[in-house]
Amino acid sequence: MPLVEKSTYSPPLLLRNAHLQTILPTLARKVNGINYQRERIKTPDDDFLDLDWSAKGFSKVCVLCHGLESSSGEPYMKGMVRALNRRNWDAVAINFRGCSGEPNRRLRTYHSGATDDLQTVVDHIQNLGRYDEIALIGFSLGGNLVLKYVGEQGAGISDRITRAAAVSVPCDLESCSQRMTERKNGIYMRRFIKKLIRKMEHKCRLAEAPFRLEQFLSMKTFKEFDDLYTGPVHGFKDAVDYWTRCSCRQFLHRIKIPTLLINAVDDPFLSEQCYPVGEAKESELFYLERPAHGGHVGFMTFDSKGEYWHEGQVADFVTRGRGLLTPASRHQD
């Protein structure tokens, strides 16, 4: 029953507002000391993925997956990389298709269920022959991707992949898409849609594009975008079919490696369906931690290391596993 009944995260009193937790790290946080080395790898469909490495010569590596319309350069990605390097892990941050500063070549891009691209990265890392151990970490959309991948792989997952973790994950895509249409989330929704439309300016110029830019300009919701682009372009009937088939919650019961999910109860992006308590209670390997506060990929703390709470929690989990949990929540492997 690996459900963490009492989280260790307790924010300063002035940071118990979920929107402050969500916005301030993006606007104000600076993470120094991370100097990526970029590597471009080919995908099976003749596209590319740009990987940003923070390699220190360790024998184990963490693969990091970012959120919607984000990249390896975000403070939450660099903060996680720094925490991992401090614990003797190399780190490689994937920039999903079209997120590295250069448009990808194909009409398709990334999405919440594109585990084929994650598999391409895992295969590449294993073929390097440098690492005995691999861990997977994802944030938001990237967290859904990681949990879906680990569940899909089930008992067949590579024996080099020893642990996984995910933070602020929309485990049920349909209900989260609906939640984002609420008035209190308007500032986030407008920002995401603006970025997605900007990306469509390139896609609409491709010869195989079955749509025009004008069709995107009046969009205000993920459903409109996923009905026109994400669903049909990536092999789904429509938005609902995409959400239904790609939500990670349905795959959690198949997880066969120690895996941690941290979702704050006050996360403004997440619906009630994003807290899989039943799945955690029934599993010996899937851990769920639900801090009362933290917003969406927030969890701010102020210490001498500049490390946010979730970064230490996740880095310790992939390093020590169950040792980070309270005694009442631990189970033997």
Image (tube, helix red, strand yellow):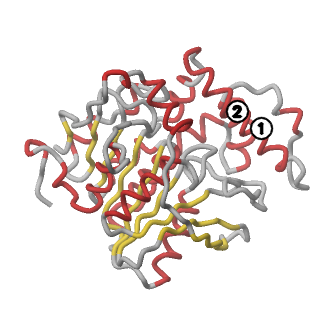
Residue at screen point 26% across, 35% down: 9
Residue at screen point 12% across, 52% down: 331
Question: Tag 2: residue type?
Answer: Ile
* Residue 318 position by quadrant: bottom left
The outermost residue toward the left is 328
| Position of residue 61 in the picture relative to residue 68 (left or right) | left
Residue at screen point 31% across, 27% down: 12
- The quadrant the C terminus occupies is bottom left
Q: Which residue is mark 2?
A: 193
Local secondary structure at mark 2:
helix
The tag on residue 128 is: none
Local secondary structure at mark 1:
helix
Q: How many marks?
A: 2
Using the image as rendered, state which of residue 2 and residue 88 is in the foreground.
Answer: 88
Using the image as rendered, state which of residue 51 and residue 260 is in the foreground.
Answer: 51
Marks 1 & 2, CB-CB < 8 Å contact? yes
82, above or below 128, in the image: above
The location of residue 155, given as percent across then percent down, is: 32, 65
The location of residue 322, given as percent across then percent down, is: 18, 54
Using the image as rendered, state which of residue 190 and residue 176 is in the foreground.
Answer: 190
- The quadrant the N terminus occupies is top left
317, above or below 60, in the image: above
Question: Tag 1: residue type?
Answer: Ile
The location of residue 279, given as percent across then percent down, is: 28, 41
| Position of residue 209 in the picture relative to residue 235 (left or right) | right
Residue at screen point 55% across, 45% down: 67
The tag on residue 197 is: 1
